[in-house]
Image (tube, rainbow, N blue to C red):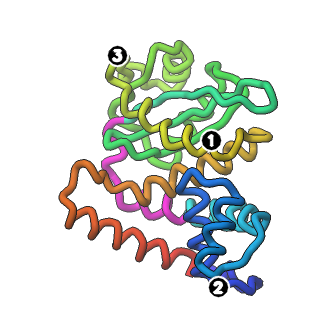
Amino acid sequence: MKNPFRYYNSPPEVIRFTVMMYVRFPLSLRQVEDMLFERGIDICHETVRFWWNRFGPLFAAEIRKRRVQNHSYSKWRWHLDEVFVRINGETHYLWRAVDYEGEVLEIFATKRRDRRAELKFLKRAMKRYGRPKAIVTDRLRSYRAAMNVIGNAADQTCGRWLNNRAENSHQPFRRREGAMSKFRDVKTLQKFAAAHASIHNHFNHDRYLNRRDVFKQNRTAALAEWRQFAV
């Protein structure tokens, strides 16, 4: 792969750090600019916007590629859910597939919440990860209609509290959405939500489940891997 940083004067370490700060944390463009200035890095907030647009999807794609190769357990059980997102006064829907450990597998933004949209979302997720053994959803009828077409309706499970994995996975995105003051179009929503989900997966180490020493080792390994992206 060609070096994606070859036409940039800024060091790759600075670009990676800037993209990580903006996508991972609920910060605005100008807040990232101010925090970098305190560290001796003088760039404009529009540069932050340009860098995340250019490198955010690139880093996220590399994260997804590595996780698809190493996480065969993602085929066991999926949790599917959708969340409402307002864009210019119109309601859009952000579909989400989450594995049994809470890691986001696939993100898909649509204008409708019908069978056609759900079918396209399922085919997209299964093309990348394969067919799961079980799928947990809410009682939206679009799920059952789409699964009848695919032929895995028997694998669907519905329950009031069974889908908490997917429901809780929306919380980091909601916090990030508030810092961005909404989205302007569905393409930007799809692009950012996909990058945010992958980068959040990379740095999510279940702090509350691990001892302090284990968490520190996982965090150090994630940062070391992040610094090797697009090398």
Per the model, the C-alpha gap separating discs 2 and 1 is 29 Å
Residue at the image position 68 percent from the left and 46 percent from the top: 180
Residue 145 picture location, percent across and down? 54, 16
- Magenta span: chief secondary structure: helix
Image vertical order of residue 137 relative to residue 177, above or below: above
Of 66 and 87, which appears nearest the observer?
Answer: 87
- The residue tagged 1 is 177
The three-letter amino acid code for the residue at tag 3 is Gly
Per the model, the C-alpha gap separating discs 1 and 3 is 28 Å
Label ID, residue 11:
2
Residue 53 picture location, percent across and down? 72, 61
Callout 1: few (<14), some (14-19), or many (20+) C-alpha neighbours within 10 Å? some
The three-letter amino acid code for the residue at tag 1 is Glu
Per the model, the C-alpha gap separating discs 3 and 2 is 50 Å
Is residue 76 located in the magenta-colored stretch of the structure?
yes
Magenta residues span 62-77
